[in-house]
Image: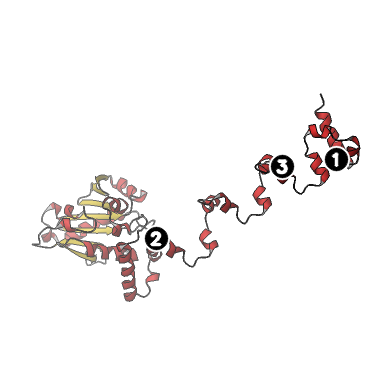
Amino acid sequence: MELRFDLWHLAFVSLVAGRAPPNFEVLSEVRLTIEPQRADLLLLRRVGAERKDDQALVLRALWARLGRVAIVEYKSPVESSFRPGDLVRLVTYGGLYETAHLDELPAPGDLTLVLVVASVTPTLRQDLARKGWTLSPLGGGYARIDGPMYTTYVAITDEVTDAERDDYLRLFSHRTAQPGEAARWLKQWMRDTRMKQPDIEELPGYEEMFQKLVEAMPVEKRLAGLAPEQRLAGLAPEQRLAGLAPEQRLAGLAPEQRLAGLAPEQRLAGLAPEQRLAGLAPEQVILALPVEVLRMLPEEHLQSLPPDVQETIKKRLRGTAH
């Protein structure tokens, strides 16, 4: 079997191991048989230990449902993380483990299977339909798969993180990461991992996980050092202008750009008469006069005007004649 070894799995193992209830032992990359087939997580109830499932700090509503042994298959929030056949593979893990540990699992409910996904994808639904199994919601982001020979639960991190208000688990969902303790934990975990594995940037999932840290940064830190054009890249015009006052939207535009598309009456709105006539030649000012005033102009004055102006005035006067 191909070993799916990426940064998301490493971080999720660290999260569960550090926040599991004290009566569980958490093992990772556990070989199920002599063949190189490994489960992401193996959760073992400590023999003789008092049940303290309510002390879990992650996936808090899951632990009380688990048997003596639980095999966990984790799927990261990266697109296409869940592949066809992964659900059947998880059930197969259960059979392999039970075969190798028959004496440790005397009761039917001793072995539990858990699938952790960010959301229920079409591929997961296809796997369920192919086997004739059903997904029964339990509330709070958890569900049970009815049909497999082992009790099988699904934890949907997109929903669990909201129901349990868990900012740590939020890092392993499609939800936007929040600044605070959880983001600092992930940052420290990545720093520690880099010390052990200097080529961490080459591991699958690094870019997506680093983006989670970026999401959790304050806005001013995310924008620090970016040129204005870099900040605006990819924004639609309405997004760029959102929140700006009218005068801010117009700042820097040439006059013809400001006036483009306006009707004449819109351009003149609010201007005093002297402002409207400013810059016009004398003959142009005469053309702006009302017809009543034009009728009162002396004939000799009209004849002193340029021929085209005279013709325009005559047309206006004829057009209003009774």
Amino acid type, mark 2:
Glu
Amino acid type, mark 1:
Val
Q: Earlier in the sequence, mark 2 or mark 1?
A: 2
Amino acid type, mark 3:
Pro
Helix, strand or loop under label 1: helix
Residue displayed at 29% across by 60% down: 168
Residue of label 1: 309
Q: Is residue 66 left or right of 10 when viewed as pictured?
A: left
Q: How crowded is mark 1: few (under 14 residues within 10 Å), some or many (20 or more)?
A: some
Residue of label 3: 273
Residue 207, given in percent of the width and then of the height, sits at 41, 65
Marks 3 and 2 in Cβ contact (< 8 Å): no
Residue displayed at 82% across by 26% down: 321
Residue of label 2: 215
Residue 277, given in percent of the width and then of the height, sits at 75, 45
202 w.r.t. 244: above or below: below
Foreground tag (2 vs 1):
1
Residue 106, given in percent of the width and then of the height, sits at 10, 56
Helix, strand or loop under label 2: helix
Taking depth in this image into account, of 265 and 31 the one nearest to the observer is: 265
Q: Is residue 66 left or right of 314 when viewed as pictured?
A: left
